[in-house]
Amino acid sequence: MNTLHLCHWQNQKHFKNHLKLVGKLDSVVIYGFVCSDDKTWIAENMGCLGHKWYLVNNRPNPNINGHEISYQQWLTLIIKYKNTLTWK
């Protein structure tokens, strides 16, 4: 069963502690303020694990990567997944 995990970014330790909840077919949406060093860390760690992940960024960004989505795209993902889990 696919689950969309919603993570309000706090720090790397918080994120690592919750990664064990993510199944192979699950996806993770990260929202909140994420500095550029943390973005790099997320990309490296999520890439190694092979999970689908998205970073909510509603501001226009010429350097946007394939993992950054807008709030509208986030809403589309929530509708697509039958199950969601929010990390607090």
Image (cartoon, grey):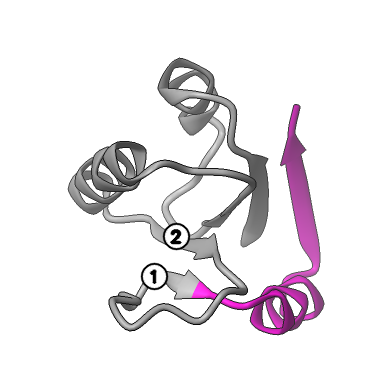
Nearer the observer: mark 2 or 1; the answer is 1
The disc placed on residue 77 is: none
Q: Is residue 1 visible?
A: no
User: Residue at 59% of width from left, 27% of height from top?
Assistant: 10
Rendered view: 83 above or below 15: below
User: Residue at 75% of width from left, 45% of height from top?
Assistant: 85
Residue under label 2? 53
The residue type indicated by label 2 comes to: Trp
Q: Is residue 69 visible?
A: yes
Task: Give the position of the C terminus as an image quadrant.
Answer: top right
Residue 20 lies in the magenta stretch: no
Q: Whole-Å distance between the Cαs marked 2 and 1?
A: 6 Å
Binning the other alpha carbons within 10 Å of mark 2 as few (below 14), some (14 to 19) or many (20 upward) gives: many
Residue 33 image point, x, y percent = 57, 44
Magenta stretch in the rendered image: 69-88
Residue under label 1? 67
Residue 81 lies in the magenta stretch: yes
Residue 34 image point, x, y percent = 48, 43
User: Residue at 41% of width from left, 24% of height from top?
Assistant: 12
Closer-to-camera residue (37/86): 37
Instruction: Please report whichever mark, 2 or 1, sits nearer to the chain's N-terminal start.
Output: 2
Residue 8 image point, x, y percent = 67, 40
Residue 39 image point, x, y percent = 34, 47
Binning the other alpha carbons within 10 Å of mark 1 as few (below 14), some (14 to 19) or many (20 upward) gives: few
Task: Give the position of the N terminus as an image quadrant.
Answer: bottom right
**Secondary element type, mark 2:** strand
Q: Mark 1 and mark 2 in contact (Cβ < 8 Å)?
A: yes
Q: Is residue 15 left or right of residue 65?
A: right
The residue type indicated by label 1 comes to: His
Rendered view: 35 above or below 31: above
